[in-house]
Amino acid sequence: MIEAPQSNLSGMQLERNAHGRLVLTLGNGLVYEAVVPVRAFPIAAPAEGLSLIASDGKEALWVARMADLQPEHRQLIEQDLAVREFVPTIERILKVSSFSTPSTWELQTDRGLTQMVLKAEEDIRKLSGRTRLQITGQDGVQYRIPDSSKLDRHSRKLLERFL
């Protein structure tokens, strides 16, 4: 018999232990040390579909909607996700070293000024439609552009050369 993950949030407790890891206690008293939150749809629906994965790699709890969690539990989960899901948002493209790849991009992001090396044009992914983009730098950091049509004219012009 396969044991299905819990999706009942009643009586559930979530806290951080002395080592900074999340500890999940289910309503039936079952305790999972060092659970890791994983979004099912991190880009398309970040507030829906979340698993808390136990240290053995199995799903301990399924959360259909983040809004269903108690505020203090949601805050703990969001703190963990913020560390693992470091995806800066590009606000402006200041300069591009070359219009062929690899090229170094100077960027203004929501996390501050940075440089990124674009290895290949294939590292720019269109997520939905033509305006929502995800760009992966040579160092593996992923950047997002929620809507390229809302970038300033200079940034759009530079970006269009790679699309």
Image (cartoon, rainbow, N blue to C red):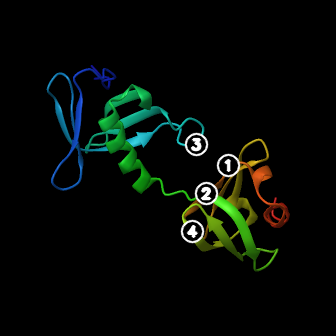
Between marks 3 and 2 in the image, the one whose residue lies nearer the viewer: 2
Q: Amino acid at mark 3?
A: Ile
To which quarter of the image does residue 69 belong? Answer: top left
- The quadrant in which residue 29 appears is top left
Label 3–label 2 contact, CB within 8 A: no
SS at circle 3: loop
Q: Quadrant of residue 58?
A: top left
Query: In the rendered structure, are the residues bearing label 1 and label 2 in contact, judged by CB atoms less than 8 Å apart?
Result: yes
Question: Which mark identifies residue 89?
Answer: 2
Which of the two labelled residues, at mark 3 and mark 2, occupies the earlier sequence position?
A: 3
* Direction from residue 5 to residue 66 in the image, left or right: right
- Where is residue 6 shown, x and y percent of the image? 30, 24
Q: Nearer the viewer, mark 1 or mark 3?
A: 1
Circle 1 is placed at which residue position? Answer: 146
* CA separation in Å, label 1 and label 4: 17 Å
Q: Are marks 4 and 2 in contact (CB under 8 Å)?
A: no
Q: Is residue 71 left or right of residue 22?
A: right
Which three-letter amino acid code belongs to the residue tagged 2? Thr
Residue occupied by mark 3: 43
The earlier-in-sequence mark between 1 and 4 is 4
Mark 1 and mark 3: span between their CA atoms?
Answer: 10 Å
Q: Nearer the viewer, mark 4 or mark 2?
A: 4
Asked if one can make out residue 65 in the rendered structure from this viewpoint, the answer is no
Of the numbered discs 4 and 2, the one sitting upstream in the chain is 2
